[in-house]
Image (spheres, rainbow, N blue to C red):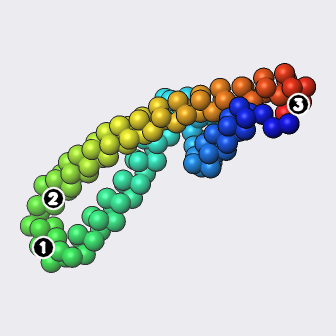
Amino acid sequence: MVNADKTKLMSECSLFEKRNSGRDYNAVKYSRSDYLRIKSIETFFFTTLGYICLFSLYMFYNYEKVVIDFLDFYEDEFYLRAAVVYLIVMLVAQIITFIKENSYYRRLSADAGMYKQRFDQIKKIDESDGNQL
């Protein structure tokens, strides 16, 4: 005979599994600090790569100005400004990543807790019915 409570719990667990991808399951395996550290490192590499690409495009676009500035020995000021802009961009990217991924991890952690709780309820129903999951 079909147990209505068990069916409801199993459908809720199935919806959770469908809604949350494999990335979500991997995120719950880590502690919050480790997860945020990994995302911070990813942000560092991707922001640096993006900044290098944009900086290179700027250099190619303003080639004459860059060469003239280099010949006039203003390159120190130019590279100092580029470094300051890079640090500002990196700081903003890290702050955005921390806020976004922290809220994502908290939501995911709560969802995973509910999933585990419902799965344990299904196990109890199975044990009381004499079935094994």
Give how far apart the Cα atoms at labels 1 and 3 are.
75 Å
Kindly state the secondary structure of the residue where label 1 is placed.
helix
Give how far apart the Cα atoms at labels 2 and 1 are.
11 Å
User: Do the residues bearing badges 3 and 2 touch, measured as CB atoms within 8 Å?
Assistant: no
In the image, taking residue 94 as reference, residue 82 lies left or right, namely left
Which of the image's four quarters has the C terminus? top right
Q: Which residue is labeled 1 in the image?
A: 65
Residue 98: quarter of image: top left
Amino acid found under the numbered disc labelled 2: Phe
User: In the rendered structure, which disc, 2 or 1, sits on the residue that comes first in sequence?
Assistant: 1
Which of the image's four quarters has the N terminus? top right
Q: Which residue is labeled 2 in the image?
A: 78
Kindly state the secondary structure of the residue where label 3 is placed.
loop
Task: Report the residue at 41% width, 48% height from top.
Answer: 43
**Closest to the observer, 94 or 68:** 94
- The residue mark sitting in front, 1 or 3, is 3
In the image, taking residue 30 as reference, residue 38 lies left or right, namely left
- The residue mark sitting in front, 3 or 2, is 3
Q: Which circle marks residue 132 in the picture?
A: 3
Is residue 124 in view? Answer: yes
Task: Report the residue at 27% width, 44% height from top.
Answer: 92
Task: Report the residue at 28% width, 42% height from top.
Answer: 91
Q: Which circle marks residue 104 in the picture?
A: none
x and y, in percent, of residue 58 in the image: 23, 69
